[in-house]
Image (spheres, grey):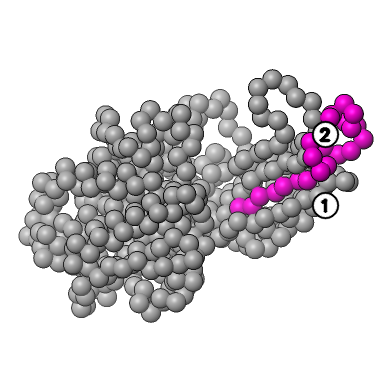
Amino acid sequence: MTIAAVDHFLQQAAPRFEGELLDLLRIPSVSAESRYAGDVRRAAEFVRTQLAALGFAAELVETPGHPIVYAESPAVPGAPTVLVYGHYDVQPADPLDLWKTPPFDPSIRDGMVYARGATDDKGQMFTHIKSAEAWVRAAGRVPVNLKYVIEGEEEVGSNHLELFLAEWKSRLAADVAVISDTSQFGPGRPAVTHGLRGIIACEVTVHGPRQDLHSGIFGGSIANPANGLARLIASLHDDAGLIQIPGFYNGIPPLTAAERQRLRDLGFDEGAYLAEIAVSAPHGESGYTTLERRWVRPTCDVNGLTSGYQGEGPKTIIPSWARAKITCRLVPGQDPEHLVRSLEAYLRRGLLPGLRLEFQSWHGCPGYVFDTDNHFMQAACRAITTAFEVPPVFIREGGTIPVVESFRRILGLDTLLLGWGQNTDNLHGPNEHFTLQDFHRGIRASAHLWHELSRLPV
Ligand code: BES
Ligand code: MN
Ligand code: MN
């Protein structure tokens, strides 16, 4: 049996696969910071080399930003074609002093690899390369047609990906897409994700006097930009947690009783959830459960807030400016472009006299939800059940992967979102990690997915 040979290969190759993952994690491919541009390219080159070593046609596709790695396995006529997406870029590692070991000097402790990108998304993405390697070495070839799009700008909004998808549309033709960049529902509770939230991301700067002023001499006579910005931020929600941006909830279909029941049936442990993040009480839109607020309701959050004196001791000034980074998580039905304009207009209307508002929109994409009742989903469930020894649950997630909606709109493709990591792996935070057991189970689930998909009628 070929799949048995693949399983056997995976066992003996496990230590080498770990070593190669550490090599990839050593490259500080932070897409947001321009000083890492050379390292970002090195990570792309690393991924390309990995795929080329399998005999796949692999190249770097240049964009105005970071390159996209594209690769294709040798054609298997009559077999389905799978488009694998992942990202080799990572979030900034700050705050550095909170890391127990350096973010780009990976270390293994208690069966977990610690490094920036360990789970998001180098570790998870790598599983789909190593599963292909197992097929090539143990069986001579993968049993399906694999096309890889591994990008380097996911963490900054995938702004150059859509043009690539449109221009390469015919070469990217496939039957289904596969992404491992989400999470399991919990330890030992693998999941297939059938919905993601979208996003709008912007930055607001409120300008006041030409320079910082003595707050005793000038205070009381002019608007303070920090006070003015705080007022705008406070006006984003009412006391029931409802977002006040005009038209914000337009287009959202009501939550059905069936969907609510589906979420309740997951048996979400709110106490454990809050304990894990060291928060004493939940908070959010009234009338919804914590899981509903995280997955199927939209949000508006400040991600960064800066103004005035940040050093030690007091300083009596009216700051010259104040700035906030704001994101809204969107659910299906909400229109990102319309909402960015509505948010900007709402903030401008609430500005105190004498202040000037500068508004910058970074990126946006709509939320998405999939049908779970098709043979691709069933094949994924069988592969996961084999590798994790328990069937997956269907979940939605609150995070965003912009390409998922683009795949649907531009390529007409649905995506299997198969997360091997945990939401507690500290993605985007200090001490990000990935359990090696999840890494290996992910590789095995991926190898079995190629097997299951190869047996579907095309
Ligand atoms: N892998 C995450 C998204 C994610 C994580 C989804 C966990 C579900 C569960 C991805 O890399 C990410 O961080 N996306 C950004 C998107 C943004 C920069 C456009 C996000 O959600 O903040
Ligand atoms: Mn990711
Ligand atoms: Mn991320």
Question: What is the three-letter code of the residue carrying label 1?
Answer: Arg
Q: Is residue 444 visible?
A: yes
The residue under the point 44% across, 54% down is 37
Q: Of discs 1 and 2, which sits in the foreground?
A: 2
The residue under the point 56% across, 60% down is 365
Q: Which residues are magenta?
A: 201-225
The residue under the point 46% across, 57% down is 153
Q: Of 239 and 374, which appears nearest the observer?
A: 239
Residue 48: x percent and y percent? 29, 61
Quadrant of the image occupied by residue 458: bottom left
On residue 349, which mark appears? Answer: 1
Per the picture, the main secondary structure of the magenta-coloured stretch is loop
Question: What is the three-letter code of the residue carrying label 2?
Answer: Leu
Tell me the element at label 1. Answer: helix
Q: Of 1 and 405, which appears nearest the observer?
A: 405
Residue that label 2 marks: 213
Query: Vertical placement of 181 versus 108: above or below?
Result: below
